[in-house]
Each structure stands twice: as C-alpha cells, then as structure tokens.
Image (cartoon, rainbow, N blue to C red):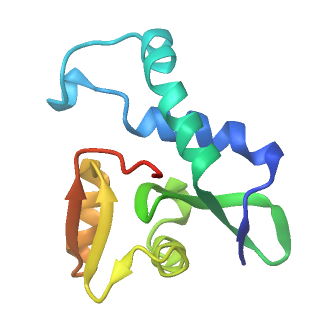
Amino acid sequence: MIRAATPAELPFIRETCCKVRWPRPWMGEGHAVSWDAWLREHGPVVDRWLRDGDALVFCQDDVPDLVLGFSVVTHGQLMCLYVKRDFRGHGIGRALVDGTGVLYGQQLLCYRPTSSLRHWARHHGFELVESIEQVVAA
C-alpha cells in the first residue's frame, strides 16, 4: 500500500534522507564530516523538501504503520528514494517511483542521485535526468 507519509513518519524520513547523502570517505564520497555537522548542514535542506514536496510511504496492507520504503518529490524532482535493505528487490522502489510523477517513459527526473539510485536505475533500464540544482517554486 502506498500512501502519504504521516507527521509521525517525517522524522524517520528526514533522518534517512540525510543519512543516504552523508559523505563517506571510505567509499570515495568526499571528505570526513561528522554526523552532527552533516545534520546541521543538510537537515534544513531536507526540511525544505518535506515542506515543499510530497513524501509517499510504502507499507504492507496488514501492517500499515510499518514503513518499508519511501519517496520524496519536490517540484517534480525525485529527491530521495529509499527501501529498507531487507525489503529490496520486491518492487517497492518501482511502485514508489510509479506513484511520484517523476518518470517520463524511461527517464527519471532526480536531484543529485546517489550511487544506490544510479545502480537501481540502471538495473531497471531507466535513464536518470539529473539536476544539480534544486528547483524552487516561483
């Protein structure tokens, strides 16, 4: 089941959006930044995504309060797509993307895709249309 995120789920979505973009030097993703510093810097960005956009969650019908994955879309761009590790490979990410309105044929409009999103998109035959700038409302 896909539905809009509840206010109670937003802290999990916020923290996860920050974590998946946290630079990891051991993975060749930039310089070391403490979690607290990263959260201070990136947290307000994610807050804006959530305020200006839409967060959808995927739950099992029989356990509607357990979030298995989510997507965040702001101004027509996919900002974050996340599926809990144990539930990957079951079509949850695809279902969330299909529900977002950011898929144009085989093109997926996204903001600064992570390496995980790049891998996922290649696996599903999608072309990523990347934006390095956040689209803001006029």
Q: Is residue 126 left or right of residue 82?
A: left
Residue at 37% x, 36% y: name it. 21
Q: Is residue 116 above or below residue 18?
A: below
From the top left corner, tell me how far across and down residue 30 is, in percent: 18, 23
From the top left corner, tell me how far across and down residue 12 is, in percent: 67, 40
From the top left corner, tell me how far across and down residue 47 is, in percent: 59, 35
Q: Is residue 37 above or below residue 23?
A: above
Q: Is residue 89 left or right of residue 106?
A: right
From the top left corner, tell me how far across and down residue 57 is, in percent: 66, 63
Residue at 42% x, 48% y: name it. 136
Q: Is residue 101 above or below residue 71?
A: below
Q: Is residue 28 left or right of residue 131?
A: left
Which quadrant would the N terminus be assigned to in this image?
A: bottom right
Quarter of the image holding residue 84?
bottom right
Quarter of the image holding residue 59?
bottom right
Name the residue furthest bottom. Answer: 105
Name the residue furthest front. Answer: 138
> Which is nearer the eye, 67 or 41?
41
> Which is nearer the eye, 45 or 87?
45
Quarter of the image holding residue 66?
bottom right
> Which is nearer the eye, 96 or 101?
101
Number of numbered markers: 0
